[in-house]
Amino acid sequence: MRIGIDLGGTKIEGVILDQTGAVAARKRIPTPNLIYEQILDAVVEVVTDLQGKAESRLSVGIGTPGSLNLSSNKMQNCNSVILNGQPLKTEIEDRLGYEIRLENDANCFTLSEAHHGAGADAHSVFGAILGTGIGGGVVINRALLTGPNSIAGEWGHNPAPNSVVQLINGDRKCYCGRVNCIETVLSGSGLSQTHKERSGHSLSALEIAKAAASDASAMESLEVYCCQLAQCLSTVVNLLDPDVIVLGGGLSNIPMLYERVPLEMSKSVFTDRMTTLISPPRFGDASGALGAACLWPAQRDSDRERMP
């Protein structure tokens, strides 16, 4: 059994995952706002509580909204900007007294779906997070690909293709300092901005999806979004050629994506017949914690350190 922690912007969720991939225990608490030391305390609290439910000390993996810079051992590229520049892994280990593994939350999402979810039977899986931000992860033969810069899969900060940029009204500045990143178009706020540019109405991504059944302008905005998503994912397929692309994040709950996006992608992917499967996630927002647990191999009872 293993512990997985999903450190999110609004909640910290922890699970104990057994050898079959089933959740044996769960704990969720709100993420403290804006105070780094309180976030540390909260993460340690969740881990300690879950460790107390086991007879032996379990391995711990943590998913975070950013990545660990391997040179400085400090956090980088975090949407929860208070974590940037902080030695999060080291300080958690100091408080717990043992080694943990820490990875980007999109990587954890992909690892979860590749081990136990929509990509469990696939050789190669790309996880595409469509939510407040745009993240991604790559798993090959059930092993996570990270890279020397810890940014493998970060397709959201590639420049949007010209065909995508042509469908928006002017340049969009990204929080990373660049303009027209894929994230500025495909994120929830990106879809909302596209709809406002086209219709003059301010709606959230969720409101647009709900209104599409009866509102022609909302449906048109979703159709544009499907075309944009297809163009951006086509570049992923041309580069990696994964067996499965699993969509995650709030926008992955829009059924229209799974009908329209593969059809649009087939026009741009460099092959006569695209066989890559575009799939919804099996675990939804639970994937982060499950994938964090999968940062460690499943352990036998004889391998685990006995708790005092």
Image: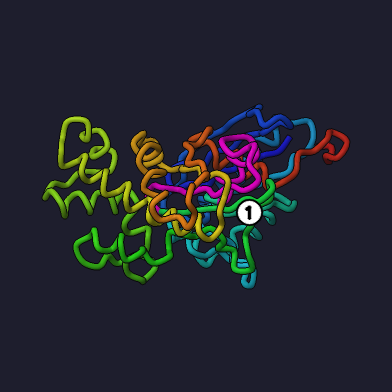
User: Is 308 located above or below residue 198 in the figure?
Assistant: above
Q: Residue at x 54, y 49 (%)?
A: 126
Q: Residue at x 24, y 58 (%)?
A: 167
User: Is 42 located above or below residue 179 in the figure?
Assistant: above
Q: Amino acid at mark 1?
A: Leu
In the image, is residue 21 part of the stretch drawn in magenta?
Answer: no
- Where does residue 145 sit, x and y in percent of width and height? 64, 57
- Where does residue 193 sit, x and y in percent of width and height? 22, 53
Q: Residue placed farthest to the left in the image?
A: 200
| Disc 1 target residue | 102
The span picked out in magenta is 107-133
Q: Quadrant of the N terminus?
A: top right
Q: Is residue 178 left or right of residue 12?
A: left
Q: Is residue 265 left or right of residue 70?
A: left
Between 228 and 149, the one nearer to me in the picture: 228
Q: Residue at x 13, y 48 (%)?
A: 199
> Residue 21 appears in which quarter of the rendering?
top right
Q: Is residue 161 left or right of residue 169?
A: right
In the image, is residue 114 part of the stretch drawn in magenta?
Answer: yes
- Residue 252 seen: yes
- Where does residue 183 sit, x and y in percent of width and height? 37, 58
Between 59 and 245, the one nearer to me in the picture: 245
- Where does residue 170 sit, x and y in percent of width and height? 21, 66
